[in-house]
Amino acid sequence: KAVGVGDDSRAPRIAQLTDALERYNVRDAFRLAVEHDGFFGRGQIYIDVRSPSGMSAWTDPAELESRLFISDKKIPKGSLLGLRIIEPVWTYPGMYNSDNPLSDDFYRPSEWYVMGKTVHASRMIDLISRPVPDMLKPAYNFGGLSLVQIAEPYVNNWLRTRDSVGDMLHSFSLSGIMTDMSQALTGKRDSNYAKRAELFNRTRDNRGLLMLD
């Protein structure tokens, strides 16, 4: 909820901001971007605005590659079309500075490739809540650690425990069958011996019946 601070009444301005937030579905856009950050390690929101010709910027390659900045000429009133959520699997970083750690844009892409289209980085809002060191950024497609990666070992442990409980319920005691092992002990191949053991393992159950021959 937007609120104003101070003595002056900011109700009209707050009403305009609230209306814009609802009209462009800003809350839903950022919610989905946060979900992508959890799934992929990076969430991206494309700022869709009209080009000077009046068409959407993604239809004009030259406009799409140009920097987006706050200006009445660059972004006139009513030119914002909406916020588009782009899954990180469709984007890949273009040019980025990798030779000067003193620069502000060190390991920060200045442009993104979106299915063959070059988009200036200023037109994309990046959400990365778990960043990785600079040396690992290219390996992570300039994203961060996803919650899926972090949760994977815990999920695997839970699945293993669940399966172990199921196995224990089906067989919580040591079972055995009486059979002729003379051929197996002398080193001779006895197919019936292995088949009887395999049959027992397949059919045993706590509610089953053991029959000895």
Image (cartoon, rainbow, N blue to C red):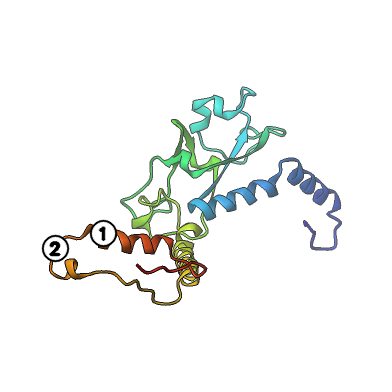
Secondary structure under badge 2? loop
Residue at x 77%, y 56% (from the top left corner): 2
Q: Amino acid at mark 1?
A: Asn
Residue at x 64%, y 51% (from the top left corner): 31
94, 66: nearer the viewer: 94
Image spot of residue 54 (x, y percent): 65, 24
Secondary structure under badge 1? helix
157, 59: nearer the viewer: 157
For disc 2, the neighbor class at 10 Å (few under 14, some 14 to 19, many from 20) is few
Residue at x 55%, y 50% (from the top left corner): 36
- Give the number of the disc on residue 45: none
- Give the number of the disc on residue 188: 2
Image spot of residue 83 (x, y percent): 63, 40
The furthest residue to the top:
53
Query: How many numbered circles are shown?
Result: 2
Image spot of residue 117 (x, y percent): 46, 31
Which quadrant is home to the N terminus? Answer: bottom right
Q: Amino acid at mark 2?
A: Lys
Q: How far is the residue under mark 1 from the one under mark 2?
A: 12 Å
Q: Is residue 36 above or below residue 84?
A: below
195, 139: nearer the viewer: 195
Q: Which residue has dot 1 on it? A: 192
Image spot of residue 211 (x, y percent): 41, 68
> Are the two marked residues, 1 and 2, in contact with CB atoms closer than 8 angstroms?
no
Residue at x 53%, y 25% (from the top left corner): 60
